[in-house]
Amino acid sequence: MNIKPSEWTVLGVTVGYIAVFSAIFLSSGNNEFLWYVITLLILVGLVALGQRTAKFPAVILWSLSLWGLIHMAGGGVPVADSVLYAHVVLPVYAAGEFVFLRYDQIVHFYGFGITAWVLWHLLQRNFPALHGTTSLLVFPVLGAMGLGAVNEIIEFIAVVVFPNTNVGGYVNTALDLVFNASGAIMAMVLIKLFIKPGK
C-alpha cells in the first residue's frame, strides 16, 4: 500500500494517543473504554484500507483523528469525581438527567458533523451526477444520523456487558441523537456555504 508521508503522520499520531489512553484505561481498570478502543481501532483500519479509493484529504483525516482523541480524552481525563465526558462545559440548563451543555454533547455534535462530511466527500467523489442537488446534502445527514444510531447500539452493548458504565439513560441517548443530527446538519450548511462539489 502506497501511504503518503502526511498520511503516516496522521496514522502515527492516532495510534500513539490510542496506545497512551489504552494504558490509562488498563491501569485504572476501565474495561468499558477498552471496548471503545477496539471500536476505534476498527474504524482506523477501515479508513486506512479505504484511503486509496476514497482519497480523503488531509483535513478530513486530521478531523477524524481529532474526533478519536477527544473521545478518548472524554473517558480518560478525570474531572472532579468523574471524567471529562460528564463535565458540564456550559451550565445552560439542568433538570435531572437533562443536562445542557456537557462535553459529551459537544463530542457528538463534532463527531457526527465530521461523519456527514466524510459521507458527503464519498458521494460527491463517486456520484458526480449528484453535484448541485439537494440529495448531496440530505443523504450525508441521514447517513450520519444512522451511524449515530449504530454508535448508540455500541454504547448499549457496553451497558449490557459491563456492570458500571457512564453511558446514561434514555434522556442521554435522546440528547446524543439530537446532537448527532445537529452536527450533521451544521456540517452540510457549512459545506453548502463554503465548498463546491469536486473540491
Image: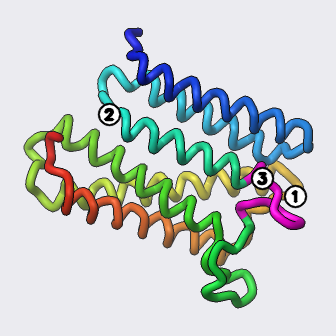
The residue identified by callout 3 is 77
In the figure, residue 106 lies in which quadrant? bottom right
The residue identified by callout 2 is 57
Mark 3 surroundings: few (<14), some (14-19) or many (≥20) residues within 10 A: some
Q: Look at the image and say whether residue 18 sits in the magenta stretch.
A: no
Determine the residue positioned at 30% across, 23% down: 53
The residue identified by callout 1 is 164
- Who is closer to the viewer here, 199 or 155? 199
Kind of residue indicated by mark 2: Pro
CA distance for labels 1 and 2: 39 Å
Using the image, determine if residue 63 lies above or below residue 6.
below
Determine the residue positioned at 74% across, 60% down: 84
Using the image, determine if residue 46 lies above or below residue 96.
above
Are the residues tagged 1 and 2 within 8 Å (C-beta)?
Answer: no
Determine the residue positioned at 23% across, 43% down: 123
Instruction: Label 2, secondary structure: give it.
Output: loop
Which mark sits nearer the N-terminus, 1 or 3? Answer: 3
Kind of residue indicated by mark 1: Asn
Mark 2 surroundings: few (<14), some (14-19) or many (≥20) residues within 10 A: few
CA distance for labels 2 and 3: 30 Å
Camera-near label (1 vs 2) is: 2
All told, the count of numbered labels is: 3
Kind of residue indicated by mark 3: Val
Per the rendered image, the range of residues in magenta is 75-85
Are the residues tagged 1 and 3 within 8 Å (C-beta)?
Answer: no
Which mark sits nearer the N-terminus, 2 or 3? Answer: 2
